[in-house]
Amino acid sequence: MEFEIPRLEAKNVEIGYGGILLYSLDASPREQIGYSIRKNGESLIGFDDGDWLEGWYVIGRDLSLGDPIFIDLNDPEIPVYTSSHGMGSWTPAFIAPSYPSFLLALGLLECISIGRSTPAKLHANPISKEESEKYLNEIATITGEAENYFWASYVGI
């Protein structure tokens, strides 16, 4: 790995049936088990398409599917990705161009989740079309992508 792990802070943002759980810097080493290492410490890092790559570091997980959220420490911008687990291979899906931009986008999700942290609360206080559009426009500005399925999925798009 060429770059250092950023200062990770634990955070839990819940909305409806989903959300994002981030690990603290202290907790994150044990969260690498099953991704870059086995329980016995044996490396799971590979060099072929679909392998977990050196420099990918798990920082959290999606609460609805349990998919890992990870950073790429080989890139100086430290982009953030996710990938479906249990598929037999890893195919990274872009979330944010950098860890700081990921935290900004997460802050937007946290704002829109207020009063909507459970399915019942979300049903009682659904996200309006205007709120959803504003959220997605702000996400697009942060991530540089007009469409980002990861962030859109939290507002039912």
Image (tube, helix red, strand yellow):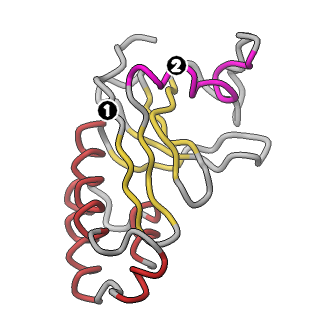
As for residue 26 lying within the magenta part, the answer is: yes
Q: Mark 1 points at which residue?
A: 9
Residue 130 left/right relative to 2: left
Spot occupied by residue 147 in the image (x, y as percentages of width and height): 37, 67
Q: How crowded is mark 1: few (under 14 residues within 10 Å), some or many (20 or more)?
A: few
**SS at mark 1 in the image:** loop
Q: Name the residue under label 2.
A: 29
Snapshot quadrant of residue 50: top right
Q: Looking at the image, which residue is at 52% across and 19% down? A: 29
Question: Which mark is on residue 107?
Answer: none
For the magenta stretch, what is the residue range? Answer: 25-39
Q: Looking at the image, which residue is at 38% across and 23% down? A: 25
Query: Disc 2 residue type?
Result: Pro
Give 128 or 157, whichever is nearer the viewer. Answer: 128
Mark 2 or 1 closer to N-term? 1
Q: Looking at the image, which residue is at 31% across and 32% down? A: 9
Spot occupied by residue 4 in the image (x, y as percentages of width and height): 34, 14
As for residue 100 lying within the magenta part, the answer is: no
